[in-house]
Structure formats: C-alpha cells, structure tokens
Image (cartoon, rainbow, N blue to C red):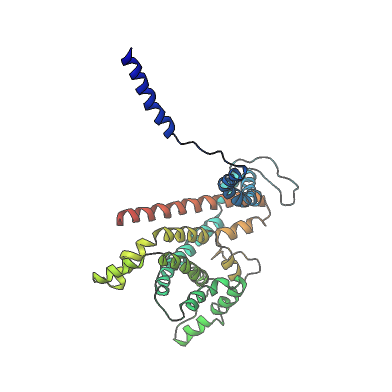
Amino acid sequence: MIDNTSASAGTAAEAAPAEAAAPVRPRLTLRQRLSHLDTKVSPYVYVLPFFVVFLIIGFYPMAYSGYLSFFSWPRFGVTHGPGVGWANYSHVLHDPVFRKALVNTFGIFLISSIPQIIIATIVAALLDNELRGRTWWRMSVLLPFVVAPAATALIFGSLFADRSGLVNDALHGLGLSGVNWHSNRPASWLAIATMVNWRWTGYNALILLAAMRAIPGELYEAASIDGAGRVRQFLSITVPGIRPTLLFVIITSTIGGLHIFTEPRLFDTNLQHQGGANYEYQTLTMYVFNTANSATNPYPRAAAATWIEVLLIIAVSLGSFLLTRAAQRRSS
C-alpha cells in the first residue's frame, strides 16, 4: 500500500511540473487581432486593384478575342455570324502576307534584341565603374527611352530617308551607292532595328546596372588579389551575379521584339501603312492591325492572327528561358 501511494505521489509530482511548464498564451486583444489580420490580408488588398483592372481591360478582351476567332463577322455587322471552326486560323496561316510578316518579325527581332542585350550589358559594366559625374552618365543613357516615339521616327526618318537621308549622304561621300531603306527588305530591318536599339538599350542597361551594384565588392577585391583582370572579373563574377536579371531582360526583350509595332509603323512612309510597298517590313502586329481593317471577316481573322502571335511569343519566350537556364546549369 505504501509503495503504491508513493508511486502515485511520484507520478503526480512529475506531472505537476510538466503542467506548470506548459506556456499559457495570453488572450489577444481586439487591437492585436486587427494588427495581425492587417499583416496577413493587406498585401493581397494592395495587389487586388491591379488584378481587377487586368481582368476587366486585359483578360476579358483576350478571352473574347479567342472566342471570336471561331466565328464569322461581316465588316459592318452588328454582331458576329455563325461559327466557322478553325477556318480563320487556316486563312491566316495560308496567307502569304502573314508569312512575310512572320519572317519580318523574327528578322527584326534577331538583329535588334541580341545586339541590344549585349551592348546593354557592356554599357552597364562601364557605368558600374567609379566615373566622374556617374549620376549624369547613368541618367543620360535613359534619355532615348524618354523621347517620344514620334520624335524618334522623325530623327531616324531623316537618317534613313531613301533620297536625302544622312546615312545615304555619308555613303555617297565615301564613293558608295545609296540604299533604298524602304524597299530593300534587309535594309529596312536594319533601319528599324537601329531605332529599337537606340531607344531600349539604355533602359535595359540601367536594369542590369542595378543588378551589378548588388554584387558584393569583396568578390572583386579577392579576384584582384588572385590576379584576375577586368575581363576575367566580368566573365567570372559579374555575368554569373546578374543571371536572374539578365534572364528577365532576355524575356522582356523577346516579348517586346515579337510584338513590335510602333517603330515599323512610324517608319512606313506609305499612306496605307502596310509595312512597305511589298510588305518588306510588315510585322505580325501590323498584320493584325491591317487585317482588322480589311473587307472580309476582319475582326475574327485579326483575333485568330493575334492568338497565333501570342502562342509564338509564349513558345519563343519559354525557349529562351530554357536555353538560359541550361547555359546557367552547365556553367555552374
């Protein structure tokens, strides 16, 4: 009996400290509950207006254009006609003008985006040095982006005019023949790509510069002690350090390059704005715009062309992302 009593007392004595050691949470006041709720909910409230506006003026038109692409719609009709299945997509894909626009778009994209990213990276690396008046230099590279596209078109229109352009005058001064910038297909691509690079290179350079400034300076100091030169430091420290930002720049440049519209539209001197007399530099976005103003089923065919362009942009952007990630993994 004594042993059982002592064992029970020992068990109770062991349980008592365990119960006493258990923390007792104080009851939160209403003010604390509201503060906790604000911390949890307020970020979603802040981003909610963007998604609401996007659903209204972004996602709904996209979804409706996809729906509309499977119907017919006369040019001056009040509403769409009967369904036609994939006929609008078939018409667009078999249209020779669409094929020209597709080649033009990829041609302008390749000779603009690739040099643009390379030059922007080099300019950002130069601006990352301790320059005199470096704030002024960093602001100056953004000036082309601030200039209105119409003013940019006037500037480059005088440079690449077929008869009295400054570029042709310089070529004549060197004893060379002038270039028909608006009727020669590769030449028109080069002129438009020059406009794109002039406007967007500084913008991308500042984004890459911000990523370079976030790289710890101790890495460069250690590399200098080990005898690494500037080029070696750039390739071994700077480029790996800005890879996420470089990937962002590549993706945005890909998206922007594949739906380019402003530069070729303003470069066009034809009153019909069709991208050259023989569609030398008509892009996919210009094709969508011109199709929407055509005579037969303009809106459904333009919607079909839009979704083909969207799928192409997604495919190319995804390909760029995968290639960049693969190169990153191989180098690491």
Say whether residue 243 is left or right of residue 104: left
Q: Nearer the viewer, residue 16 or 325?
A: 16
Q: How many marks?
A: 0
Say whether residue 315 is left or right of residue 39: left
Q: Outermost residue, bottom direction?
A: 173
Q: Nearer the viewer, residue 248 or 319?
A: 248
Say whether residue 243 is left or right of residue 207: left
Is there any visible trace of residue 309 in the rendered image? yes
Percent position (x, y) of residue 131?
A: 42, 79
When the figure is inspected, residue 33 is found, relative to residue 163, above or below; the finding is: above
Q: Dividing the image into 4 quarters, which one contains the N terminus?
A: top left
Is there any visible trace of residue 193 in the rendered image? no
Residue shown at the point (42%, 72%) measured from the top left: 123
Q: Outermost residue, top direction?
A: 1
When the figure is inspected, residue 184 is found, relative to residue 35, above or below; the finding is: below
Percent position (x, y) of residue 42?
A: 59, 49
When the figure is inspected, residue 299 is found, relative to residue 234, above or below; the finding is: above
Percent position (x, y) of residue 203?
A: 50, 68
Percent position (x, y) of residue 79?
A: 73, 45
Q: Nearer the viewer, residue 303 or 89?
A: 303
Residue shown at the point (42%, 61%) measured from the top left: 246
- Can you tell which quarter of the image residue 281 is in? bottom right
Residue shown at the point (32%, 69%) measured from the top left: 220
Q: Dividing the image into 4 quarters, which one contains the C terminus?
A: bottom left
Q: Nearer the viewer, residue 20 or 111?
A: 20
